[in-house]
Structure formats: C-alpha cells, structure tokens
C-alpha cells in the first residue's frame, strides 16, 4: 500500500471523527495513526480532547453505509 501523507490523513480525520467517512477511509486513517503521533494528537483534538481508553487503540464514530 502506498504511504499516505499526514496532510491527507489530517484532512480525513474530521470525517472519521464525525462518522461520515466510509469504512475504507476509517481503516486507512486508523492504520496511519498506529505509527504517527502527530496525527493521533490531531484526532484527539477533533474529538474534543477526549482520549480513548487504550493508548494504542483509536476509536471512531461508526462509518455510515
């Protein structure tokens, strides 16, 4: 898989956090955030500063079909 830039991931984070992103997009963002502290921090900001219960597990609103 081609590596997606942080800029693209950060553009997608609000869609994932709001539940409007598709399943493939959510999976791509989740995979990227496993290794990117900056994007994880941006996700936390998008979620209003709430942290998920597990440090390495990131939760998104369920994707809409």
Image (cartoon, grey):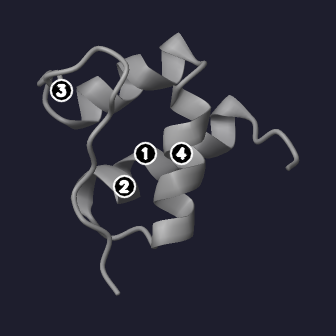
| Label 1 crowd (10 A; few <14 / some 14-19 / many >=20) | many
Of labels 1 and 3, the one closer to you? 3
Task: Answer left or right for 17 relative to 31.
Answer: left
**From mark 1 to mark 2, how far is it between C-alphas?**
5 Å
Please tell me which of labels 4 and 2 falls first in the chain. 2
Q: Quadrant of residue 64?
A: bottom left
Report if residue 10 is visible in the image. no
Q: Is residue 15 above or below residue 17?
A: below
Please tell me which of labels 4 and 3 falls first in the chain. 4
Q: Which residue is mark 1?
A: 13
Q: Which residue is mark 3?
A: 52
Q: Are marks 1 and 4 in contact (CB under 8 Å)?
A: yes
Q: Are marks 4 and 2 in contact (CB under 8 Å)?
A: yes
Task: Answer left or right for 45 relative to 24.
Answer: left
Q: Position of residue 25 (x, y in %)?
A: 54, 61
Element at badge 3?
Answer: loop
Task: Answer left or right for 63 relative to 1.
Answer: left
Element at badge 2?
Answer: helix
Q: Which residue is mark 2?
A: 16
In the picture, which quadrant includes the C terminus?
bottom left
Q: Position of residue 7 (x, y in %)?
A: 66, 35
């Amino acid at each position: 898989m081609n590596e997606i830039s942080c800029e693209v991931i950060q553009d997608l984070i609000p869609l994932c956090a709001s539940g409007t992103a598709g399943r493939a997009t959510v999976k791509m963002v989740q995979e990227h955030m496993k290794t990117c502290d900056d994007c994880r921090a941006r996700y936390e900001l998008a979620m209003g500063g709430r942290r998920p219960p597990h440090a390495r597990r990131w939760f998104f609103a369920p994707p809409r079909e």
